[in-house]
Image (cartoon, rainbow, N blue to C red):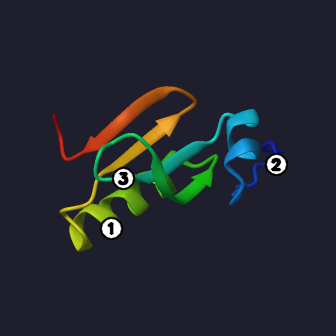
Amino acid sequence: MPPHWSYEETSDPRHADRRNFYKVEQWSRDDMHIARLHYAGNSIVRARAEFARLTRHRPRGRYTIRQGIRVLERWPPR
């Protein structure tokens, strides 16, 4: 029998950090503060889909996919 796997999501950034979730964040214009948390959960597939949707619909925004302090992807690319 395969192991039980469930997807977890949260809107609490502290809980996401404790659980080492993937986070899709929108940053302020000066890149100093997180303006909004768009996704926090344990699915990299869902995080990448949300990131792609955001960069396609709002290409002038500043977004990252992070896991803890590690930045997996950034928009706009540097």
What number is the disc on residue 28? 3
Q: Of the two numbered discs 3 and 1 on the same chain, state the one appearing first in sequence.
A: 3
Q: Of the two numbered discs 2 and 1 on the same chain, state the one appearing first in sequence.
A: 2
Q: Quadrant of residue 16?
A: top right
Comparing labels 2 and 1, the label whose residue is closer to the camera: 1
Q: Residues within 10 Å of mark 2 (few under 14, many from 20)?
A: few
Q: Nearer the viewer, residue 57 or 32?
A: 32
| Extreme residue toward the bottom, this view | 57
Amino acid, disc 3:
Ser
Residue appearing at x 39%, y 33% in the figure: 72
What number is the disc on residue 4? 2
On-image quarter of the N terminus = top right
Q: Nearer the viewer, residue 62 or 19?
A: 62
Q: Provide residue 14's location: percent of width, then percent of height.
A: 73, 43
The mark tally for this picture is 3
Amino acid, disc 2:
His
- Kindly state the secondary structure of the residue where label 1 is placed: helix
Q: Nearer the viewer, residue 51 or 34?
A: 34
- Kindly state the secondary structure of the residue where label 3 is placed: loop
Q: Relative to 19, does residue 47 appear above or below in the rendering?
A: below
Q: Provide residue 11's location: percent of width, then percent of height.
A: 68, 60
Name the residue carrying label 1: 53
Amino acid, disc 1:
Arg
Residue appearing at x 45%, y 45% in the figure: 33
- Kindly state the secondary structure of the residue where label 2 is placed: loop
Residue appearing at x 76%, y 49% in the figure: 5
Q: Provide residue 27's location: percent of width, then percent of height.
A: 38, 51
